[in-house]
Amino acid sequence: KLGLVEITYVISYENFGLALVWVDDNRDGGATRSHCGNRLTKKSCKNFHRGVQCLVGTWKEPASVPTVTILQNRIEDETTKFLHICLTPISELRKGEENKFKLLGTRVY
């Protein structure tokens, strides 16, 4: 059986950025970790290999609200995996002076 991984985070009008998220067998994040230092654009957020997802914490409404994403990768029963989340450098998609990402929770079911 395969389990879903659900990520809940905040999207906001100002000061929130973009994060990359993935699940793998490597405690240190493996080769994917090198992408964490790259500035992302709308186009580059769509070009990651299967399993790496871009979580966009910005939107145009003047409010902050929670949102949920279900990861593409599934976790098989009786296996151990690592969930990696990294905040990428400030990009053109972020408004405001700060760059943050607010993770609210994760669920595996």
Image (cartoon, helix red, strand yellow):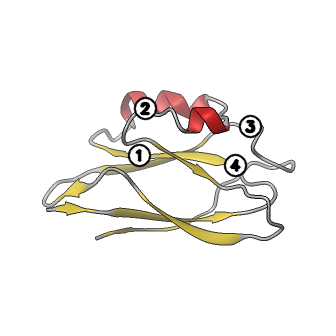
The residue shown at (33%, 41%) is: 27
Q: Which residue position is annotated with label 3? A: 91
Q: Quick check: marks 3 and 2 in contact, CB under 8 Å?
A: no
Q: In the displayed structure, does residue 99 sit left or right of residue 86?
A: right
Cβ–Cβ below 8 Å for labels 1 and 4? no
- Label 2 CA crowd tier, 10 Å (few <14, some 14–19, many 20+): some
Looking at marks 2 and 1 on the same chain, the residue that comes earlier in the sequence is marked by 1
**Residue 77 x, y percent position in the rendering:** 15, 61
Residue at numbered disc 4 = 17
Q: Give the residue number, with chain letter if any, for mark 2.
A: 32
Q: Residues within 10 Å of mark 4 (few under 14, many from 20)?
A: many
Q: If you read the primary sequence from the N terminus, does the residue marked by circle 3 or circle 2 appear first?
A: 2
Q: Which residue is denoted by mark 1 in the rendering?
A: 22
Q: Amino acid at mark 3?
A: Ser
Give x and y (percent) for residue 64: 74, 70
Could you tell whether 47 is left or right of 75 in the image? right
Q: Which disc, if any, is residue 94?
A: none
